[in-house]
Amino acid sequence: MSVEGYESRIIDGKVLAKQIEDEVESRLEALESGRGITPGLATILVGDDPASRMYVRLKHRACERVGIRAEDHFLPAETSQEELISLIDSLNKNKDVHAILLQLPLPKHLFPQEAMEAIAPEKDADGFHPYNMGKLMIGDEGLVPCTPHGIIRALEEYNVPIKGKNVVIVGHSNVVGKPMAAMFLNRNATVSVCHVFTDDLKKYTLGADILVVAAGVKHLIKADMIKEGAVIFDVGITQEKDGVYGDVDFENVIKKASLITPVPGGVGPVTVAMLMKHVLKCAEENF
Ligand SMILES: Nc1nc(=O)c2c([nH]1)NC[C@@H]1CN(c3ccc(C(=O)N[C@@H](CCC(=O)O)C(=O)O)cc3)C=[N+]21
């Protein structure tokens, strides 16, 4: 990538992830030596989608690095809703499992919302349970989704003020856009949420002091759509034969941004590190 001279504007997600994982590791050691608890994460993957497999593998590797006990539950694509719920029920009751992660998306015949509601809210490391989502909405942030949490952490790390700033979020998914909006509102930013049906996207993005893009459209955001000095988080992942692409035209946008996350090596690794933090929190608070 030709970004010479602009390197200092890059938020290195791997460096930040390492820092978060180091914190987790030392708190985890204290939990083990102090209370004899080793945090345990159970991941559930239904079907053998290659991308999902890779993401689950990334999470297991992170568990290994920090010392979380991870168990992998792989279910065949034809698993029924009842079988899935019954696995979740047994993991809810298992005292050695402090956190449960149901990898999304699920095969089309299954109901993700019902499955996520079956996860005990105190074991919901992803923060996707309606109880945890509801708490987030009313400003009581407990277990919150990993990607938005990682973005807030990055802003803190780089001392970017949030209060009173214009934040624009592109994408209104339950896993990124909506919880992200709530987290910024909780910190008194002025928040606009745009999505596929937004008329004249550029009109909004041009006003953004902080821009979070999670649309899944390769290079949706061009340099002429952003304000000079904006802070930009690219959550997009478009996998093509020759590589992974984000939602931001990075090489051109970096010339106007003050801080920006690359893809890969930006938001992704921070998301995984935040998951580790959440598993630790589940183990500290519920055993
Ligand atoms: N219940 C659930 N929780 C999730 O957190 C969840 C999920 N389902 N389903 C899928 C998405 C996707 N996701 C990513 C995590 C890390 C990277 C990551 O670390 N990527 C590396 C490698 C990229 C590559 O080489 O392709 C990077 O950006 O540098 C990417 C994507 C978590 N997700």
Image: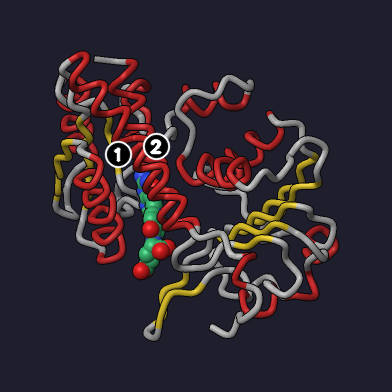
Q: CA distance from mark 1 to mark 2?
A: 6 Å
Q: Residue at x 57, y 70 (%)?
A: 217
In the image, what residue type sits under mark 1?
Leu
Q: Nearer the viewer, residue 180 or 23?
A: 23
| Residue at image mark 1 | 101
Q: Is residue 243 left or right of residue 247?
A: left
From the top left corner, tell me how far across and down residue 170 is, in percent.
Answer: 66, 56
Q: Looking at mark 1, is its residue's CB closer than 8 Å to ligand 1?
A: yes
Task: Write down the quadrant of residue 232 in the picture.
Answer: bottom right
Residue 111 - label? none
Q: Is residue 215 above or below residue 110?
A: below
| Residue at image mark 2 | 126
From the top left corner, tell me how far across and down residue 185 is, in percent.
Answer: 71, 33
Q: Residue at x 19, y 46 (%)?
A: 64
Q: Is residue 130 left or right of residue 121?
A: right
Q: Is residue 173 left or right of residue 166?
A: left
Q: Residue at x 58, y 85 (%)?
A: 2
Secondary structure under tag 1 reads strand
In the image, what residue type sits under mark 2?
Asp
Residue 230 visible? The answer is yes
Q: Nearer the viewer, residue 159 or 49?
A: 159
Residue 199 visible? The answer is no
Asked whether the beta carbons under mark 1 and mark 2 sit within 8 Å of each other, the answer is: yes
Q: Looking at mark 2, is its residue's CB closer than 8 Å to ligand 1?
A: yes
